[in-house]
Image (cartoon, rainbow, N blue to C red):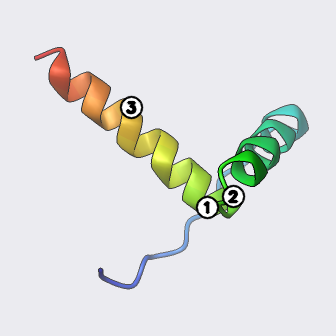
Amino acid sequence: MQHPNPISVRIPHEVKDWLKSRAEENSRTVSGEILALLKAARQAEGSKA
């Protein structure tokens, strides 16, 4: 895996709290949870084609 390039994203507090909760439930970091959600969305989008 390549070294990731950091990005800044403004996220409302309630969404950040939700991400933290999901990350803890899934034994992931918040970054890992975001990546998992993005990968799932990407796969779902690809399956629609």
Of all residues, the one furthest to the left in this rendering is: 49
Check disc 3 and report the residue beneath it.
41
> Is there CB contact under 8 Å for labels 2 and 1?
yes
Question: SS for tag 3?
Answer: helix
Check disc 1 and report the residue beneath it.
31
Q: Which residue is drawn at 43% across and 77% down?
A: 4
Check disc 2 and report the residue beneath it.
30
Q: In this view, does 11 lie to the left or right of 14?
A: left
Distance between the Cα atoms at labels 3 and 1?
15 Å
Q: Could you tell which of marks 2 and 3 lies nearer the N-terminus?
A: 2
Q: Is residue 48 above or below residue 3?
A: above
Q: Is residue 15 above or below residue 8?
A: above
Dividing the image into 4 quarters, which one contains the N terminus? bottom left
Residue 38: image location, x then y, percent: 44, 42
Dividing the image into 4 quarters, which one contains the C terminus? top left
Amino acid type for the residue under numbered disc 3: Ala
Most foreground residue, 8 or 48: 48
Residue 45: image location, x then y, percent: 26, 24
Most foreground residue, 49 or 10: 49
Q: Which residue is drawn at 68% across and 64% down?
A: 29
Question: SS for tag 1?
Answer: helix
Distance between the Cα atoms at labels 2 and 1?
4 Å
Amino acid type for the residue under numbered disc 2: Val
Q: How crowded is mark 2: few (under 14 residues within 10 Å), some or many (20 or more)?
A: some
Q: Could you tell which of marks 3 and 1 lies nearer the N-terminus?
A: 1
Residue 7: image location, x then y, percent: 56, 65
Q: In this view, does 44 lie to the left or right of 38?
A: left
Q: Which residue is drawn at 59% across and 51% down?
A: 33
Amino acid type for the residue under numbered disc 1: Ser
